[in-house]
Image (cartoon, helix red, strand yellow):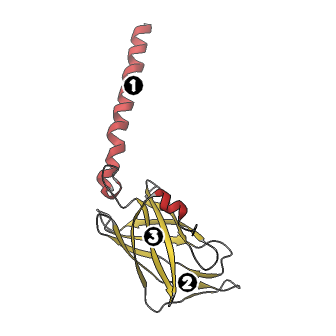
Amino acid sequence: MAIARRSRLVLVGSVFVVGLALIYPAKWLIHPWAAPWKPGLVGYWQGEVAYGPGDNRTMVLRLKDGVGGGDESSEIGGSATVCGSGQPVTYAISGYANDYRGTSFFLNAEIPTNGVGLFLGRLDGSWDGHDSLAMSTALLKIDADGTASRVTSGDASFQLRRASEADFAAACDS
C-alpha cells in the first residue's frame, strides 16, 4: 500500500517536472527576442539622447522579459536612467513588441512623480536583431504646476548600443 502511494507521488512529481520543462521554454516560441541562448532585445543598452542643441545626455536602458502579458501587464519591462542636467532621472519601463521577432517595439517611460523638467515620452524602437536599437521619442516638459507639453515638434531620434550590467550601474558616475 505504501509502495503504491509512493509510486503515485513519484509519478505525479515527474509529470509536474516534465510539464514545467515543456511549458517554460514555450514562451520563447512566442517571444523569440527574449531567448536566453542568443543576444536578444532583452538586456542592457546605452547611448546618447539629444535633449536640445548642446544638451546630449547619457541614457542606459535595461529591458527584461516575462513581466506578464495579457491585459493587465506588459511583455517587456525594465528601467531606464538618463544622466545629465544635474540629477539622473530613472524611469520604470513597460511595453510590447509590435512583431513576432521583437524588431519593432514601443516602451512607456513612467515619469517620476512630482517631476519638473524635461522627460522622455513614449519610446518607439526598432532592433537590428543584434547589438543596436534605433529609438525615437517626443520629449515632454513638465512645469512646476504639473502642466505637460511636448517640447519637440517631431521626434527626437537616437541610437543605443548593447552594454553590460556594469555600464548600466556606472552610467551616471562621471
Q: Earlier in the sequence, mark 2 or mark 3?
A: 3
Report the side of 24 relative to 80 (left or right). Answer: left
Q: Is residue 19 visible?
A: yes
Report the side of 168 relative to 23 (left or right). Answer: right
State how far apart marks 2 and 3 are (Cα): 15 Å
Tally of numbered tags:
3
Mark 2: which secondary structure? strand
Q: Name the foreground residue: 19 vs 87.
A: 87
Mark 3: which secondary structure? strand
Amino acid type for the residue under numbered disc 2: Leu
Task: Confirm or deny contact between disc 2 and disc 3 (CB under 8 A).
Answer: no
Amino acid type for the residue under numbered disc 3: Leu
Residue bearing mark 1: 12
Mark 1: which secondary structure? helix
* Disc 3: CA contacts within 10 A as few (<14), some (14-19) or many (>=20): many
Residue 75, position in %: x, y? 43, 59
Amino acid type for the residue under numbered disc 1: Val
Comparing marks 1 and 2, which lies closer to the viewer? 2
Determine the residue positioned at 33% across, 45% down: 25
Report the side of 63 relative to 151 (left or right). Answer: left
Q: Quadrant of the N terminus?
A: top left
Residue bearing mark 2: 140
| Label drawn at residue 56 | none
Residue bearing mark 3: 107
Residue 154, position in %: x, y? 43, 90
Q: Name the foreground residue: 88 vs 127.
A: 88
Determine the residue positioned at 64% across, 74% down: 87
Determine the residue positioned at 39% across, 25% down: 12
Q: Earlier in the sequence, mark 1 or mark 2?
A: 1
* Disc 2: CA contacts within 10 A as few (<14), some (14-19) or many (>=20): some
